[in-house]
Image (tube, rainbow, N blue to C red):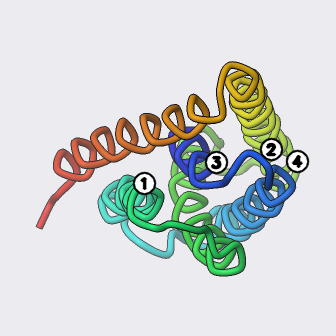
Amino acid sequence: MLFLIVLLSGIEIERWKSMLGLITAFTIGHSLTLAIAVVHAPILSSATVEFLIPVTILITAAANLVRKQTDIYLSVIFTGLFGLIHGMGFAGYLSALMPKDASIWKPLLFFNLGVEAGQIIIAAAFVSLLFIAQYISKNAVHIAQRVFSIVGLGISLFLAAQNWNY
């Protein structure tokens, strides 16, 4: 969810429709690797995935803070790729919950739908707060987005350092 908040912090509020494209790219990415990793085998070790997830947040937060304008097409590509990494993390969690002899498709579908519902709720709440902040001041939205990016950067640095196993 931190990735989603940081991701949405990089988009100007006037381009809220672009946020839907980013959420869709993330969903497609993590749904693909979630299905592949649960059905077949993990693609990367869990230690590597647990390190890479905060790295994706760190990269996204840093990009939010240094770029002037968002190239939405480039953002969609990176978001989809980062979704692949996050899907591997979800797969590890789902695999741990599943009995070994259980049918995978129904739990996979419901787990993915639950993740998506959570993302939609978080995204809707966050974007709603940005729209409310816009009524206070246009500057308030930009400040809030930068603050969320900075906080995300700090948290992701901490998590990446904590999961550094090399």
Tell which circle, 4 or 1, labels the residue nearer the N-terminal end.
1
x, y percentage for residue 139? 57, 34
In the picture, measured across the screen, residue 122 lies left or right of residue 57, that is right
Residue 70 versus residue 97: which sits nearer the camera?
70
Tell which circle, 3 or 1, labels the residue nearer the N-terminal end.
3
In the picture, measured across the screen, residue 125 lies left or right of residue 61, that is right
In the picture, measured across the screen, residue 94 lies left or right of residue 122, that is left
The C terminus is located in which quarter? bottom left
Instruction: Say few, some or many: other residues with alpha carbon within 10 Å of mark 2 (under 14 / 14 to 19 / 20 or more).
Output: some
Residue highlighted by disc 1: 61
Would you place residue 81 above or below residue 134 in this image? below
Q: Residue at x 55, y 40 (%)?
A: 142
| Label 2 secondary element | helix
The image quadrant of residue 146 is: top left
- Give, as a three-letter code, the residue at label 4: Lys
For the residues carrying marks 3 and 2, which lies nearer the camera in this image?
Answer: 3
Answer yes or no: do the residues labelled 4 and 2 have beta carbons within 8 Å?
yes
Residue highlighted by disc 4: 106
* Mark 4 → mark 1, Cα distance in angstroms: 35 Å
Q: Residue at x 15, y 60 (%)?
A: 165
Instruction: Say few, some or many: other residues with alpha carbon within 10 Å of mark 4 (under 14 / 14 to 19 / 20 or more).
Output: few
Would you place residue 139 above or below residue 66 in this image? above
| Label 4 secondary element | helix
Which numbered circle lies on residue 107? 2
x, y percentage for residue 111? 76, 42
Tell which circle, 2 or 1, labels the residue nearer the N-terminal end.
1
Q: Residue at x 71, y 79 (%)?
A: 73
Which numbered circle lies on residue 8? 3
* Mark 4 → mark 3, Cα distance in angstroms: 30 Å
Instruction: Say few, some or many: other residues with alpha carbon within 10 Å of mark 1 (under 14 / 14 to 19 / 20 or more).
Output: many
